[in-house]
Image (cartoon, rainbow, N blue to C red):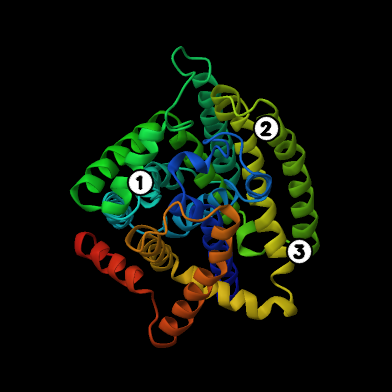
């Protein structure tokens, strides 16, 4: 396959990584409950509510969906290698994610991707057509949404301290995040185990579905740039419009219900998850439709370098943010708008790091280590 196609795939991965930080910055700088509920302390200020609404409509879940589909595309690319090599590769990713989650940040996705990726790889390796992959992916994704809806009807699901935390809960979260040490490790370990339970029970279905959809889009050439620019642009704007037709009413209903946990956190979250996936596909289509033009060649080249070092850059974002918010004590000192102002600065660090590192080396430092560890267990 021409290297141009892989550069486009890498640039899409780089775009998704930078987009994820737009939401993750709130996960570092604000309490856990603030990520999903802007009214976790009562009705927010106008500016804070407006910023959250815009992020909810155009960012939340979108870049994670993009990243999951691109991860699935990567699994499809590597499916021709031995099962042992792929198992080793995903095992080391999961182990790295576990350490990242327990010792650095509880918002880790690597452990989940490593574990879910193992199941997804089995399906990919045993499915011969893109159409079958797409059908299976959509089915599993719908099952995940259905389980989320079902959970909202279960007795005892009417209140969550993670949704509207008490002052004691917020103070405790502040204490273990800023003090660190064994207490923080113990809390993060418990949160990591609870996250994996939710993955097994509900989110894993969605994530597996997204990975298989991405694998199907790689298999049929869509993620390799095989469609025409006109087709990508048309598909992108149609999907984007459709996502807004779902996103905006759901977001307004969340405000109208005053952030009732069951309605806003379960019932309305289902259409928002669907809208985020459609929007992720829309952003991919628009990037493929416009990012391949001559005017975007420099941006494409920069993003492709970030994408080639996705793992290293993801961990670099964690190191920067945990240092600023937990070690320097910036946690809970900024509102959403002020946190967003920090994002371009961290992007610049990612860009400079990627450009300088790849000037002298072929792989990112963590990618190199990952490959070496993989080879220790299985022969390529």
Which residue is at a point 21% across and 45% down the rendered structure image? Answer: 183
Residue 105, percent from left and from top: 35, 52
* Tag shown at residue 228: 3
The answer to whether 181 appears left or right of 318 in the picture is left
Q: Disc 1 on helix, strand or loop?
A: helix
Please tell me in which quadrant of the rendered image residue 380 appears: bottom left
* Tag shown at residue 327: none
Residue 232, percent from left and from top: 74, 59
Label whose residue precedes the other's in the sequence (3 or 2): 3
Real-space CA distance between mark 1 and mark 2, rounded to the nearest whole angstrom: 27 Å
Residue 107, percent from left and from top: 40, 48
Residue 238, percent from left and from top: 79, 48
Furthest residue in direction bottom, as rendered: 360
The answer to whether 315 appears left or right of 286 in the picture is left
Real-space CA distance between mark 1 and mark 3, rounded to the nearest whole angstrom: 51 Å
Quick check: 143 above or below 319? above
Q: Mark 1 points at which residue?
A: 174
Q: Disc 3 on helix, strand or loop?
A: loop
Label whose residue precedes the other's in the sequence (1 or 2): 1
Q: Mark 2 points at which residue?
A: 255
Camera-nearest residue between 281 and 129: 281
Camera-nearest residue between 255 and 197: 255
């Amino acid at each position: 396959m021409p290297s141009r196609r892989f550069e486009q795939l890498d640039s899409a991965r780089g775009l998704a990584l930078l987009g994820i930080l737009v939401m993750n910055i709130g996960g570092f700088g604000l309490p856990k409950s603030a990520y999903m509920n802007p009214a976790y302390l009562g009705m927010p200020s106008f500016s804070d509510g407006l910023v959250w609404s815009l992020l909810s409509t155009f960012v939340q879940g979108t870049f994670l969906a993009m990243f999951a589909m691109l991860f699935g595309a990567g699994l499809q690319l590597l499916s021709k290698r031995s099962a042992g090599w792929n198992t080793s590769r995903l095992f080391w990713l999961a182990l790295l994610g576990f350490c990242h989650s327990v010792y650095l940040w509880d918002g880790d996705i690597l452990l989940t991707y490593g574990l879910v990726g193992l199941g997804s790889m089995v399906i990919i390796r045993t499915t011969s057509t893109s159409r079958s992959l797409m059908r299976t992916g959509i089915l599993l994704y719908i099952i995940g949404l259905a389980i989320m809806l079902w959970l909202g009807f279960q007795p005892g699901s009417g209140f969550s301290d993670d949704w509207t935390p008490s002052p004691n809960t917020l103070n405790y979260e502040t204490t273990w995040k800023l003090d660190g040490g064994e207490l923080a490790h113990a809390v993060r370990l418990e949160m990591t185990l609870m996250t994996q339970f939710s993955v097994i029970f509900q989110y894993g279905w969605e994530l597996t579905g997204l990975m298989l959809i991405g694998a199907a889009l790689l298999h049929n050439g869509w993620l390799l740039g095989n469609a025409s620019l006109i087709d990508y642009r048309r598909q992108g704007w149609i999907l984007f419009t459709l996502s807004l037709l779902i996103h905006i009413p759901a977001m307004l209903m969340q405000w109208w219900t005053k952030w009732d946990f069951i309605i806003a956190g379960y019932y309305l979250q289902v259409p928002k998850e669907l809208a985020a996936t459609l929007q992720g596909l829309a952003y991919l289509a628009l990037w493929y439709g416009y990012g391949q033009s001559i005017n975007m060649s420099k941006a494409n080249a920069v993003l492709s370098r970030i994408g080639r070092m996705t793992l290293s850059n993801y961990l670099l974002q964690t190191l920067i943010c945990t240092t600023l918010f937990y070690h320097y004590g910036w946690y809970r000192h900024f509102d959403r708008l002020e946190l967003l102002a920090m994002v371009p600065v961290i992007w610049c660090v990612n860009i400079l790091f990627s450009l300088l590192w790849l000037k002298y080396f072929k792989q990112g430092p963590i990618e190199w280590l990952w490959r070496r560890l993989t080879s220790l267990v299985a022969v390529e």
